[in-house]
Image: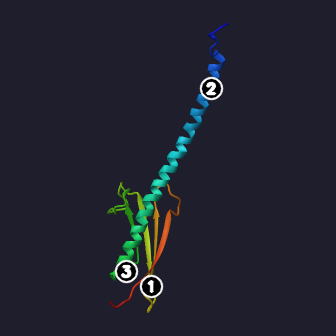
């Protein structure tokens, strides 16, 4: 009776194991670039959404204080801070907004804001808000 089995892995079995492991690793490596692209797009969309909401609220405040501006194109850095010139190296987002003034005697403005960034689609992201206020305080 033989207690110890002296058989081990053959060279063919080892080569098959190495081949399967290599195939699995290469498959995972190709998915990494897709994951990084998705994470980058998600980061831009999250930042852009925060800036978009801030811009809408800022324009609403301007209307409520009686100082609306009809149309402006501004730029922001990666953290959403406004920058002086859209030609600065730190420019990340381009913010375009328009305010449609009311036709007398109405007191309702329509605010449209659009954000674009390098690598985004031509449209970027957009949002709008309707703001009303009384003329007399």
Q: Quadrant of residue 5?
A: top right
CA distance separating discs 1 and 2: 68 Å
Q: Which mark is residue 53?
A: none
Residue 36 rendering spot, x and y as whole percentages: 50, 46
The residue sitting at the right extreme is 1
Would you say 6 lies left or right of 108 here?
right
Q: Is residue 117 visible?
A: no
Relative to residue 45, is residue 98 depicted above or below? Answer: below
Q: Which mark is residue 19?
A: 2
Q: Secondary structure at mark 1?
A: strand
Q: Residue at x 59, y 29 (%)?
A: 22
For the residue pair 113 and 136, the one nearer the viewer reads as: 136
Query: Percent x, y for residue 76?
Result: 37, 61
For residue 87, which quarter of the picture?
bottom left
Of discs 1 and 2, which sits in the foreground?
A: 2
Instruction: Look at 36% across and 72% down and name the residue there.
Output: 58
Q: Which residue is mark 1?
A: 108
Discs 3/2, front? 2
Left or right side of 74 for 4: right
Q: Closer to the camera, 4 or 96?
A: 4
List x then y, in percent, for residue 102. 44, 86
Residue matched to label 3: 63
Neighbours of disc 3 within 10 Å: few (<14), some (14-19), many (20+): many
């Amino acid at each position: 009776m033989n207690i110890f089995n002296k058989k081990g892995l053959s060279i063919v079995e080892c080569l098959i194991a190495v081949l399967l492991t290599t195939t699995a690793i290469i498959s995972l490596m190709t998915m990494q670039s897709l994951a990084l692209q998705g994470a980058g797009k998600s980061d831009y969309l999250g930042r852009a959404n925060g800036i978009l909401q801030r811009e809408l609220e800022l324009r609403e405040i301007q209307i409520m204080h009686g100082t609306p501006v009809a149309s402006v194109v501004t730029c922001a850095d990666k953290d959403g801070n406004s920058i002086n010139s859209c030609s600065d190296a730190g420019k990340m987002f381009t913010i375009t907004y328009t305010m449609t003034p009311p036709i007398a005697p109405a007191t309702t403005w329509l605010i449209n804001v659009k954000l674009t960034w390098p690598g985004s689609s031509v449209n970027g992201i957009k949002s709008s808000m309707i703001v009303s206020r009384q003329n007399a305080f």
